[in-house]
Image: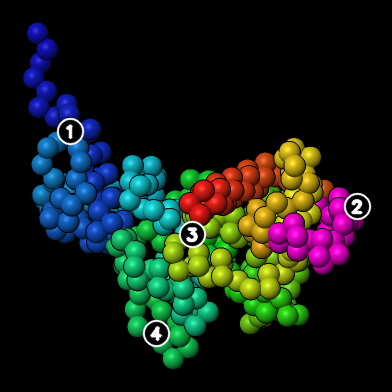
Amino acid sequence: MKPFQPYARWPAIREAFLLGIARAYLLVDAKAHLRSGYVDLVWDCDIWPCPPSVCQMRYAGAPKTAIERLRQGKLGIDDKLGCWTGDFFLGLKLSRALAEKEIGRYRIDSKLHPELVSDIQNWILAGRLGAADRDGRRRLIACPAARHLPAENPQGDGVLAGLFAGARLSKIGGESWLELPDEEPVRRLLTDWTILHYPSRRIERRSYLKVSPFYAPLVADLIPEHSRMRILNIRKSAMCPALPIFYWEWLYSIVKEGMTTLPFADALPFGISRRTFYRHGWRRYGLHRKAVLELGILTVDPRLRKRMEQWFERHHQERRERLVSN
């Protein structure tokens, strides 16, 4: 007969408590361990049917150990976070839209990023924006997600989405560009995705890179609403329609039957229709050579290619549905 073990289940129960508190930190309140009713809102555990009391949460190690659990990620609430994942927050930090002036304290320039401010005001996460100072900067208050939520894939498309959502949108030479800090993590991410980038100007004693907005819509499904519309509504995108034409020639002109040129304007972001292609004097002859020699498109990362394919299939399907309905 086995001896009686009253605390045999405690490690599993403690882990469940910490997981529930970590979830509450993200979705309810940064002080959720002080109020048991806050953890009730996200509690979903078969091991222990009742949410923990304040005493039980402190006995389990909150807040210190619960924050460590939060930093481990994999909380099982990705469907509730929506676009606001650890990857997306990492991208915002790389773009400097979330500027860390003090350790663990972030602020946003509401004059540069009004769309991002609108997205944060409408999110379901814990945390809020403070009042703007005289320069329009607003501090992000009591938001454990921005401070502790880890990125599961530091080179993934979620990070790229955050990078573009937080980029500066600038007019240079009559064209719209996305400007990003000229720093090694940003360069490495863009190079890893084979995204063309070029040196830009210096702003507030910091060097910047410029990227064509062509690439941003490819990850628009991972960007919150207002920031997404800012990207999709860009006019006179830099390097367009050359980029979509060159990428189509490089990737799809041979494999897509009857589609040697862009079949319709939205086949790739900021593209043009086949009729406009020929009306403006474009010819297919030499396009591949120009892509290599003029822009240096030597290879396309499989993830970028997959994103282009998804964009084309989605808009092709929408176009067919509109034609059928009409």
Rendered residue at 71%/59% (across/down)? 273
Quarter of image, res 259: top right
Q: CA distance from mark 2 to mark 3?
A: 37 Å
Q: Quadrant of the N terminus?
A: top left
* Disc 2 and disc 3 in contact, CB within 8 angstroms: no
**Residue 281 versus residue 92: which sits nearer the camera?**
281
Q: Secondary structure at mark 1?
A: loop
Can you identify the residue that label 2 sits on? 285
Q: Are marks 1 and 4 in contact (CB under 8 Å)?
A: no
Q: Earlier in the sequence, mark 4 or mark 3?
A: 4
Q: Residues within 10 Å of mark 4 (few under 14, many from 20)?
A: some
Quick one: label 2, few (<14), some, or many (20+) residues within 10 Å? few
Please say whether residue 102 is visible from this viewpoint.
no
Using the numbered discs, state the Cα–Cα distance from disc 3 to disc 1 in whole angstroms.
34 Å
Q: Which residues are magenta?
A: 272-297
Q: What mark, if any, has residue 46 been given in the picture?
A: 1
- Marks 2 and 4, Cα distance to the nearest angstrom? 54 Å
